[in-house]
Image: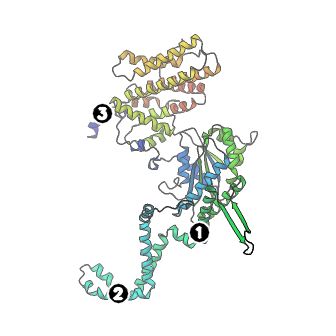
Amino acid sequence: MRREIARLLGPDHESLLVIEGMAGLVSANDPQYWVANQTETDLQRKLDQMDGGAIAICGPRGVGKTTLLKKACGARLRYPHTNFHFHVVVQTPANYRPEEFLLSLFQDVCRRYLTLYGRRGRGLFLVRSRPVDVTRRLIRSLPALIWLATGLALLAFGMSSVAQDVYAWITSDARSTAQGWSDPALSWAHGFARNHQALTQAAAAITGLAILYRRRPRVLRWLASRRLRLLIKDCHNYLHLLQHVQITGASATIGVPRLAGLLLTRTTGASSRTLTYPELVAQFRDLLTRISAEERRDGWKVFIGIDELDRLGSAQQARDFLSEIKAIFDIPNVYFLLSVSEDIGATFIRRGMPTRDVSDSSLEDVLHVEPRTLEEAQQLLQTRLPGVTDPFVALVHALAGGIPRDLIRYTRKLVELRHRTDQTDLPTLARHLLLEEFAHTLSSFRVLLGTHDRTAEWGQTLHRLREATSILHQDDDQRAPRQQLLTAETEVTRLAVVPTSPDTDEASAHWEELSTYALFVLTLLQVFTPPSFTQRREQHVEKDHGNLQRLATARMELSVSPASARLMIQQFREAWDLPPLPSQP
């Protein structure tokens, strides 16, 4: 049957898009679809070699820095389905003042720690009853309460004389019932318990102690530890201090009975002031030090994740941010994970050549997150979209450059095209996806190029770009003539070899980017749209520069140097025996 199905599907059956489920694409941030890679192992090794400090995670946008930060903070690197560490993850605002950011982080740490022990910040000016919250909290605590009651009952049974009398009464009353038991095992158990009461009570006491030890809630530890009670109380106090301004007053009135009309009044008052930035840093360091010392007793660590540092606007703003908050980084057993731009990571790597900056004095290490390889992309997409085959993974991987966020985006578009066109074969879906993406790119470049020279020749160039965009959009029309559809690839080819006509350097650079991207799209069209992709891949993939991973590398190289990316694409085209480009007009 397997051979017959393979014969009916044909030799290129992997080029059919069969969808078994889309839950992984819909829930892009669901932890159950996170796929581990070598970068996570590297980060875990760095954390094991440190006793606190700051590690920066750098890489291009969408490469998975936030996901890696959340996994590390929640102890999911080594244990994917657990959540051991005390952690707080905050987002960096685009416009900030260091004291405001630290004030917000201070409050988040206090709230998070109170929540860990089932507490919440008390309202100072508003008192409300929350019967729904109380009921919900009791329901959530019911299993722990049952285990607690069971353990205490067994312990009391093993150690109390009253329990022994109750046991003797129960056994004497149930003796006649036990004689009628048909199960020999139950009869034997009853007889053993009756004849060996001391041993039974000792076993019950040991079992009760084991249950209390294994199922001990953190509330019991809170009740037993005065130091922890003081720490939770201080978290409440800090929240009040950081959120409210307290005003207290006192007055005294002195009256003299014999002298009518003589009345002396004295009033005094005091109000709290906001903490200065040095005081705020000192108080925050003290609180984190106490929290880390308390959590170390359970083998936990304290993680503070600071996300979106790469959105501060410039590398200089990120350096200024680090210079302001680096005073809180050197706390034992407290780990700070920061997602930063590639500029900060490159500056740290170049430390000491020839000068040093704030990244060297603030960070313990920098972890660079690389785009996913083709094998890692296959694992990621097959986890999120079961049934997707290697040719489609190679297509979206090349378009995304190995960036996980774009891998999911392009896979969604591929599934959307499948439903829109009612087609499942690779050539049709690849053609529609590539031309649609290039049409959107061409429209954005046309707006960018329109801000440059206003000469008549430049206007004709922009007009040709508009016509090319119209031709590319017509490719989505199933009623368009075949000749019109063939013209779309011709337009991509023409843009890939068109000379740089603008005069200014900036316009020339933009034009070179557009031309190189057109060559990249043309190469993908010539690789994925002809039939028998699997056979052609086996013929060319073993050649030098013929690996499909090189397409994704060239896509990422385009953001660094269009000239370097064009060279990589040309080498790939030669390895795959693709037709040479026509000469420039």
Query: Looking at the figure, which quarter contains the N terminus?
Result: top left
Residue 285: horizontal and vertical position, in percent?
Answer: 67, 58
Dot 3 surroundings within 10 Å: few (below 14), some, or many (20 or more)? few
Q: CA distance from mark 1 to mark 3?
A: 69 Å
Amino acid type of disc 2? Arg
State which tag comes first along the sequence, 1 or 3.
3
Q: Is residue 477 left or right of residue 83?
A: left
- Name which residue lies at 68% across and 39% down: 316
Closer mark to the observer between disc 1 and disc 3? 1
Amino acid type of disc 3? Leu
Residue 54: horizontal and vertical position, in percent?
Answer: 65, 51
Assign a secondary structure to mark 1. Answer: helix
Q: Quadrant of residue 428?
A: top left
Q: Is residue 564 left or right of residue 542?
A: right
Amino acid type of disc 1? Arg
The residue that disc 2 covers is 194
- Name which residue lies at 56% across and 19% down: 450
Residue 218 is at least partly visible in this image: yes
Dot 1 surroundings within 10 Å: few (below 14), some, or many (20 or more)? some
- Name which residue lies at 47% across and 73% down: 212
State which tag comes first along the sequence, 2 or 3.
3
In the image, 321 versus 207, the foreground residue is 321
Q: Is residue 275 left or right of residue 585?
A: right
Query: Looking at the figure, which quarter contains the C terminus?
Result: top right
| Vertical position of residue 173 compared to residue 26: above or below | below
| Vertical position of residue 354 compared to residue 193: above or below | above
The residue that disc 3 covers is 9
Closer mark to the observer between disc 1 and disc 2? 1
Q: Residue 229, labelled with which disc?
A: 1
Q: CA distance from mark 1 to mark 2?
A: 45 Å
Residue 363 is at least partly visible in this image: no
Residue 501: horizontal and vertical position, in percent?
Answer: 59, 14
